[in-house]
Image: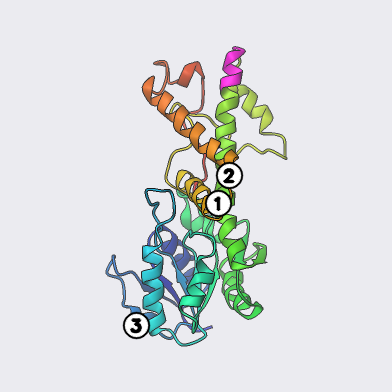
Amino acid sequence: MSAVGVLGVGVVGGAVAAGLGRAGLEVRLYDRYRGLGRPEDLGDCPLVFLCVPTPPCADGKADLTEVLRAAGELARILAPGSVVAVKSTVTPGTCDSLGRAFPHLRFASVPEFLIAARPEESFVRADRVVIGAPSSEVAETVARVMRRAVPGAPLLFLRPVEAELVKLCSNAMLSAKVALANELAQVCAAFGAEWARVQAAVGLDRRIGPDHLTVTPARGFGGFCLPKDLDAIVAASRAAGYEPRVLEEIASFNRRIRSLARAVGNGDGNGNGSGLRQSAALSTGEA
């Protein structure tokens, strides 16, 4: 393949560009906000990774302003049949909508699962690559590049809407695990037991695993991605006509327990939230 384009060179786009470059691919960058390149630099790229931010709106939905702007820019410069691989976390159905709006381009969903503290490493050492494509031809175009950039990772081929849901569902599952760990820490405290000691044994169960079980003085899950993506899947579900009550309760529980931790000053003076002796770092693996 000739040069591969990356539009948006923040944390996600930077990791993608670095990974593609290490794989020996020619990478062309464009980021209007960082002053990198020009849209025309991507004009002859048969594949462009779209990596722009999708911050939350007040109602929890993903703000797709930058995605639509970027897609419009690419539509003006890319040759018919070019593939746009959307790595931004978007509302389910976005790639299908983009395909209808810009029918001369082909849109695929290739969600990112980066760890915020190690974006480049987590890109090249991904435990899976998900490609949501409207056709086998588009899927193979993306797969050829991803096989080189992420060798050894299994490739899963889905429909675009399914791939878009994978990212939101994954972070919803991680949110639920953090919330449940915090609830169980309260249960342990009621019996005078230390959750950190119980946690170590629980995490050895291969079906559960040790990740996302640590409870910190701040309580619950913070950061950017878990709260944002949980709210996004709740909002998207409601818009689709389904009330996701379990997900709503996870979000509500997290807000309550984090507010409680703030109200008591994040602990009892010994670094222990609500009398719980816990590790000082919450491993959320947020992306």
Task: Name the residue at the front extreme.
Answer: 241
Q: Residue at x 43, y 86 (%)?
A: 44
User: Cα distance, mark 2 to mark 3?
Assistant: 43 Å
Neighbour class for label 3 at 10 Å: few (<14), some, many (≥20)? Answer: some
Residue 136 screen position, x and y as percent: 66, 77
Indicate whether 99 appears above or below 55. below
Is-magenta flag for residue 146?
A: no
Q: Earlier in the sequence, mark 2 or mark 3?
A: 3
Per the image, the residue denoted by label 3 is 40
Q: Magenta stretch?
A: 186-192
Neighbour class for label 1 at 10 Å: few (<14), some, many (≥20)? Answer: some
Q: Residue at x 29, y 65 (%)?
A: 34
Is-magenta flag for residue 191?
A: yes
The amino acid at mark 1 is Ser
Q: Nearer the viewer, mark 1 or mark 3?
A: 1
The amino acid at mark 2 is Pro
- Asked if residue 9 shows in the view, the reply is no
Task: Name the residue at the top extreme.
Answer: 192
Indicate the secondary structure of the residue bearing disc 1.
helix
Per the image, the residue denoted by label 2 is 244
Per the image, the residue denoted by label 1 is 237
Q: Earlier in the sequence, mark 1 or mark 2?
A: 1
Q: Earlier in the sequence, mark 1 or mark 3?
A: 3
Do the residues bearing badges 1 and 2 touch, measured as CB atoms within 8 Å? yes
Q: Residue at x 54, y 64 (%)?
A: 93
